[in-house]
Amino acid sequence: MEQRASPWRIAVNASAVAILIFLILPSLIIIPISFGNANEIVFPPEGFSLILFRRFFNEPGWVESAWLSFRVALWATAIAVCLGVPAAYALARGRFPGKRVIALFLLSPIMIPHVVIALALFVYFFQIHLSDGMLRLICAHVVATLPFVIVTSHAGIRNIDPVLEQAATVMGAPRVLVLRRVTIPLLYPSIISGALFAFLISFDEIVISWFISKAGYTPLPVKMFSSIKWEVSPVLASISTMLTILSVVIAVIVVLILRKQSDREGAGRS
Amino acid sequence: MTPELREQVRIAAFAAPATLFMLVMFAVPLGDVFLQSISTKTGAGFSLAAYAKILNTPLFTRVAYTTIEICIGSTIYAFILAYPIAYFLAKQPPARRSFCMILILVPFWTSSLVKSFAFTVILGHAGVVNDLLGAFDVGPVKMLYNRIGVTVGMSHFLIPFMVFPILANLLGQPPELAKAAAMMGAGKLRTFLRVTFPLSLPGVVAGALLVFILSLGFYIVPALLGSRHDVMLSQLVDFYAREILDWPMASAIAVVLTGVAVIAAVLLSQVRGGASILSKEAR
């Protein structure tokens, strides 16, 4: 193929690069602002200081909210993985009747607007008198994250050659042993990326939490939402920077895991 | 019971805990919303009063119209902005493609709050865009707390969801087709318009439906970047549920919202490549 720069190629590349910059700009623009030394939101910032980060740790409420979100995300992820990975196994390996219905049902929260789930849980928690602030958030976040764990681990199980499991079974290993020694070790990359995905979704979840969170149990996104809506505190810049770094770290880890996985598959094929 | 059947029951049992949890925490609450929407305010008997009421409430019809307008607009803008990226990525060698993927995955995984907050800085009265425009003696243009802010914020959010299905389609096209068109004398633009683009339409339709479904439920972006003229149905659900405390009304709106999303999802499952977005079962 000719590699000469045709007008078509230049036009495509230029517009793609411009749009990529537009995509990444909001994530990046906050970082310099958060290191500014002014107590207001300005770009470009003047000077350099950590004053906004210090305010995050000193102002009441922020650290408590972040800590709550962290604990909720950890619990929700753990539960979603424990429920989701076996379900994905059943959906990938089973041929039982009703499988498609169950798959559709378990994945449906992806397609239903979060505000509908939020309203449903808001009314439901009221009716069943579930008033524990922490438990409300964890249950709701499992609903929101479970489909993503199932999708990721389902794709992972599909990539494992069933022959490996059959070989172990033929050699007399009981199912539990096959799962523990063959399936799950091969599945680790998918479980880890699914878990990271679930953790981030829970940590950032806002609409459902906004409906169901109780006084004294304000997750970080809910506190941020009120802050952006009512006062636009500059502390938001430092929180946003930390959240962006968290997203970047998780995105890079997942890309590396997926790349390693596809390398291995590529090597297996050749 | 045959051994094969017993084996299948054992495998199916692995899905039981998740199914049970989702029945209790998802199906029952959602069914309850549906029941709320067809019950009278006192809770006795069934009635379609809530649906009749929303249709006769100017607030609902206006907000529904705004929602459709914003959703279709953002879907179109997301398509216009996503296609060049997908096309560009499809042409890159794998190493550079995965680097560019990070540029898409980072905003994709960034909290919508962070992005909305960033847009208040970018689009604000003394924001970055107005600074740039000011250098050319233009503006300041009001881009925040109006339709422009909502559309920019939503399109930005939706672009990655549009890129993925289009990119998957473009990567799945046999490269020989474009080569054959070039050998027969078609220019690059002509090859694109007559071969690549028409073949990519299933990916485009899948992406557009997915993005439309997602845009229906937007709450954060219109709440933070829009004005009271840009209120969307999600915000109306919140308004009726928690400020007016009219649960049948809130539920009726939620049911309408879900209905539209489900119709779009069914259409999506009919599109080639769309089913695999809904569930990986299609493979």
Image (cartoon, grey):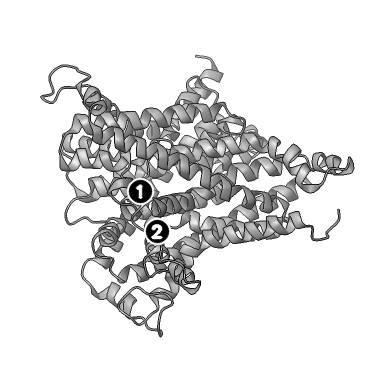
Q: Residue A59's x, y, as percent?
A: 23, 72
Answer with left or right where residue B20 lies relative to residue A130.
right
Residue A76 - label: 1
Q: Residues within 10 Å of mark 2 (few under 14, many from 20)?
A: many
Give me the residue at 49% from left, 57% from top: B107
Q: Is residue B222 above or below residue B241?
A: below
Where disc 2 sits, the SS reads loop
Q: Amino acid at mark 2?
A: Met
Rendered image quadrant of residue B62: top left
Q: Chain of mark 2?
A: B
Q: Residue A133's x, y, as percent?
A: 20, 50
User: Would residue A149 be visible to someone looking at this image?
Assistant: no
Residues tagged 2 and 1 counted as in contact (Cβ below 8 A): no
Q: Residues within 10 Å of mark 1 (few under 14, many from 20)?
A: many
Q: Residue B247's x, y, as percent?
A: 19, 33
Callouts 2 and 1 in the same chain: no
Give me the residue at 47% from left, 27% from top: B12
Q: Chain of mark 1?
A: A
Rendered image quadrant of residue A259: bottom right
Give me the residue at 69% from left, 40% from top: B197
Q: Is residue A82 above or below residue A94?
A: below
Which residue is under mark 2?
B143
Q: Amino acid at mark 1?
A: Ala
